[in-house]
Amino acid sequence: MDRHIPLTGQPNFRDLGGYAASDGRRIKWGVVYRSGELSQLSDDDVGKLGDLGIRTVVDLRSPEEVSARGAGRLPTGARVFPMPIASSDMFAKLIPMFLKGDFSKVPPDLLDQINRILVRKFTEQYAGLLRALSDPANRPLVFHCTQGKDRAGCGAAMVLSALGVPWATVIEDYLLS
């Protein structure tokens, strides 16, 4: 099966199924997906999410991001669990530099710093994601942030690790974004 689900309004929508766990079992396809924001989906995209049977959406975006970009366009009946990870806190000093194109003060270990912040500061949100996923009534489930990289990437790493996927494979999945 193809991991990437082609959507016109979100290029980073992926199925986390198919990975082999350390005990030889495989993660079931069609149960958990990771993505960037769902607010720019076309009607056809929403139909595809409906065809996937998406029941639950865990939105990791901050309230400011939801306000600026809009809530997700979802199939009828899908429930949204907001579990905001306020990226504005993490990137407040970096955004002005990026807007000016001045990358001279960006630390070389920026991604490491961001991932440490995500894991240490937002444990409740990630625990909420794992709790939501553990309830069969919530599946199939998609979790997302704005780009589907850092916050969703950390979430995917936690989900795959919790399911026994070897760390090297978890890293490979993370690098797909």
Image (cartoon, rainbow, N blue to C red):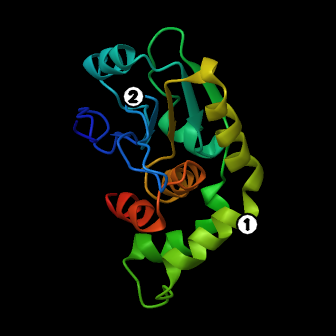
Residue at image location 36% in from the left, 77% down from the top: 101
Query: Furthest residue to the front?
Result: 23
Q: Residues within 10 Å of mark 2 (few under 14, many from 20)?
A: some
The numbered mark at residue 120 is: 1
User: Position of 154 compared to 48: left or right?
Assistant: right
Q: Which of marks 1 and 2 is nearer the N terminus?
A: 2
The numbered mark at residue 168 is: none
Which secondary structure, mark 2?
A: loop
User: Position of 173 compared to 138: left or right?
Assistant: left
Residue carrying label 2? 30
Q: What residue type is labelled 1?
A: Arg
User: Position of 56 compared to 7: left or right?
Assistant: right
Query: Furthest residue to the top?
Result: 76
Image x and y of residue 13, in percent? 34, 39
Asked which quadrant contains residue 7, the reply is top left
Q: Which amino acid does label 2 sit on?
A: Gly
